[in-house]
Amino acid sequence: MFTLFLPHNTQNMAQRRQTSILLIYTGGTIGMIRNPLTGALESFNFDHLLRHVPELRQFNLDISSRAFNPPIDSSDMNPSLWAKLAEVIYTNYERYDGFVVLHGTDTMAFTASALSFMLEGLMKPVILTGSQLPIGVLRTDGKENLLTAIEIAAAKNEDGTPVVPEVCIYFHEKLMRGNRCTKISADSFDAFKSHNCPNLATAGIEIQYNRHLIKPYDASAKLKPHYAMDSNIIIFSLFPGIRREVVQKILEGKELKGIIFRTFGSGNAPQAQWLIDALTEATRQGKVIVNVTQCLAGSVKMSLYEAGRQLLEAGIISGHDITVEAALAKMMFLLGKKLSPDEVRRQMRRNIAGEIS
Ligand code: ASP
């Protein structure tokens, strides 16, 4: 861990303590350098961050860091590690004004979604970022992403309240609500998009905040962390030619409690009776089935076509315009609370953390 105490304006200091940021490095490309001998990418010792990003010294901020040991590729993220992240934020909540989480891009949208539910009552910025090229590579996008994410996490209104008191992803000039994002490119620097919710800010020469879209600050809110996530669920995507035996096998699963059902267009499925019967039976057994469109943008409207209306009758509930990442995290979170299937269904329909419009 390092702490940077940087030169500051003494008059300012007398009035207010320095803004403090906790950087949490979980792993991923951003924290890598190329081994000159083997040419392979390896995680660098995060204690040496300053050597790779000396620009951090120019911030008038008190920046500390924590690193996952060992750092992980985000493909290895899981609900226990989300809980660990939530716990680090919770235990350091009073001490820091904002949090920046460095994370691999592959599952960043899942982690951001999970944190948005697990950190109930959050009123400080938690900004996730990463990069497509390692920070130790000349053309890296990691420096800009990291420096701007820190600036956003430290941004305050005139009255000292945070500008962005919520979980976000900052990537390639865009600040997006964490539970509205999807990774859209494996190789472009512009790797994330929030299809159904406008960006919360755009970083050009200045950072332009869309304040009307950002969660309002509430001084009376208390952070209440939730660590239990129930992952006995599945993401199940329809395709033309899907087989009855396969669907039945999946839906019969004894352990299975929830299904993120990825349908066509505005929430449509083949009008085969065997499919409707299998879904109706799964619902009857207490499995929660949420309809999420395979389209990247737009919303489920099951009453629009007969192919969707039948699903409504089978007890499937609409995910509206939720992303698949947020639907998954929300279902794990609600099942983790040990609510009844009906209560999980009720809460899946409502907006809890800005995840649906
Ligand atoms: N595989 C890496 C990860 O998600 C890719 C990245 O960091 O962008 O951890």
Image: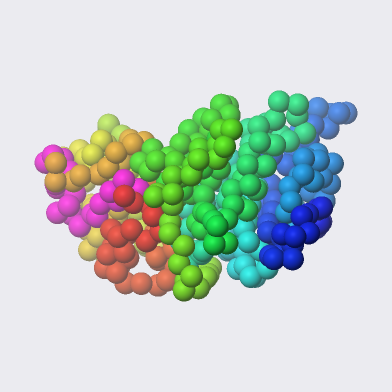
- Is residue 309 one of those drawn in magenta? yes
Seen at 51% across and 49% down, the residue is: 168
Which residues fall within the magenta stretch?
305-322
Left or right: residue 57 versus residue 349 is right
* Percent position of residue 152, x then y: 59, 48
Which residue, as the protein is rendered here, is positioned at the far front?
Answer: 11
Which residue, as the protein is rendered here, is positioned at the far left?
Answer: 306
Left or right: residue 48 versus residue 202 is right
* Percent position of residue 41, x then y: 76, 34
Against 322, is 143 above or below?
Answer: above
Seen at 73% across and 36% down, the residue is: 135
Residue 79 versus residue 204: which sits nearer the camera? 204
Q: Quadrant of residue 157?
A: bottom right
The answer to whether one can see residue 281 in this image is yes
Left or right: residue 347 versus residue 90 is left
Q: Say which quadrant the N terminus sits in.
A: bottom right
Seen at 39% across and 55% down, the residue is: 354
* Percent position of residue 348, x then y: 32, 59
Seen at 25% across and 44% down, the residue is: 300
Residue 111 versus residue 3: which sits nearer the camera? 3
* Percent position of residue 60, x then y: 74, 51
The answer to whether one can see residue 68 in this image is no
- Is residue 122 one of those drawn in magenta? no
Tell me the colour scheme of the image: rainbow
Which residue, as the protein is rendered here, is positioned at the far right?
Answer: 37
Residue 14 versus residue 242: which sits nearer the camera? 14
Please state the total of marks drawn on the protein image.
Answer: 0
Against 164, is 255 above or below?
Answer: below
